[in-house]
Image (cartoon, rainbow, N blue to C red):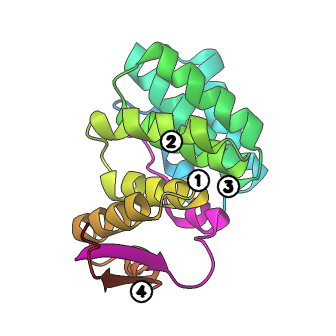
């Protein structure tokens, strides 16, 4: 018997991802770069939250890794402020500096989804997940959303399942999985 997966209800809303799913990148040291990291963890930072990030990038002597992390954190704040194009620029700059930070790619993908660049988001997610990001469940959940937006229902289901396995206390992947139904069909014989 063939197993066929169908989805029930609307596709996952990409906007729901941004409110809960950013992975701030830790800074070693202190000063404005650390303040930027703390601001990136706020669920709804105001525009003033960008100030320590901007100062850190302009005035502090940061290691390459901390500069990349500060760019990621500023990108997170910009996304939460709805500044997706600026966030994309920050994530791409971070990736140019430190190409092995998986969270940079995951956050880039989130911004790309918001700007309706699903194919580019999928490529960023695949790269980010290959680098073992600190918040892989967010990557799998986001990739599930992208697969669903692109019409690849079985891949979406598998990624939502993986996100639920990695973050069993996170309700959103389970909510997405509840929209799917697996049905069996008799196999045709010739």
Crowding near the residue tagged with mark 1, few <14, some 14–19, many ≥20 C-alpha atoms within 10 Å: few
Distance of mark 1 from mark 4, alpha carbons?
19 Å
Q: What's the residue at 56%, 63% (across, down)?
A: 17
Image quadrant of residue 128?
A: top left
Local packing at callout 3 (Cα closer than 10 Å; few below 14, some 14-19, many 20+) is many
Q: Looking at the picture, how far across and down is residue 31, in whole percent?
A: 49, 32
- Relative depth, front residue between 180 and 174: 180
Q: Tell whether 120 sits left or right of 157.
A: right
State how far apart marks 2 and 3 are (Cα).
Answer: 21 Å
Of the residues under marks 1 and 2, which one precedes in the sequence?
Answer: 2
Q: Is residue 8 magenta?
A: yes
Question: Judging from the image, what secondary structure is the residue with disc 3 in?
Answer: helix
* Residue topped by disc 4: 178
- Among the 4 quarters of the image, the one containing residue 177: bottom left
Question: What are the residue bounds of the magenta stretch?
Answer: 1-27
Name the residue carrying label 2.
Answer: 122
Q: Is residue 164 above or below residue 55?
A: below
Of all residues shown, which one is farthest toward the front?
A: 190
Position of residue 24 measured from the top left corner of the image (x, y, whole percent): 45, 46
Distance (Cα) linking label 4 and label 2: 23 Å
Asked if disc 1 and disc 2 are in contact, CB closer than 8 Å, the reply is yes
Residue 77 visible in rendering: no
Reading the image, the residue beneath label 3 is 80
């Amino acid at each position: 018997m063939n197993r066929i997966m169908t989805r029930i209800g609307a596709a996952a809303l990409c906007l729901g991802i941004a409110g809960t799913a950013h992975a701030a990148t830790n800074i070693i040291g202190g000063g404005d770069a650390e303040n930027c990291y703390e601001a990136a963890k706020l669920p709804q930072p105001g525009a003033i939250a960008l100030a320590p990030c901007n100062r850190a990038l302009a005035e502090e002597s940061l290691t390459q890794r901390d500069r990349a992390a500060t760019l990621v954190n500023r990108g997170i704040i910009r996304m939460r402020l709805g500044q997706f194009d600026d966030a994309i620029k920050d994530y791409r700059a971070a990736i140019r500096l430190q190409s092995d930070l998986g969270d940079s790619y995951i956050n880039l993908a989130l911004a790309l989804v918001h700007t309706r660049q699903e194919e580019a988001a999928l490529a960023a997610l695949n790269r980010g997940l290959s680098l073992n990001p600190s918040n892989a469940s967010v990557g799998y959940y986001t990739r599930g959303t992208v697969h669903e937006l692109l019409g690849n229902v079985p891949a979406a289901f598998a990624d939502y399942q993986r996100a639920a396995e990695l973050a069993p206390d996170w309700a959103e992947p389970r909510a997405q999985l509840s929209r799917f139904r697996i049905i069996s069909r008799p196999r045709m014989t010739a």
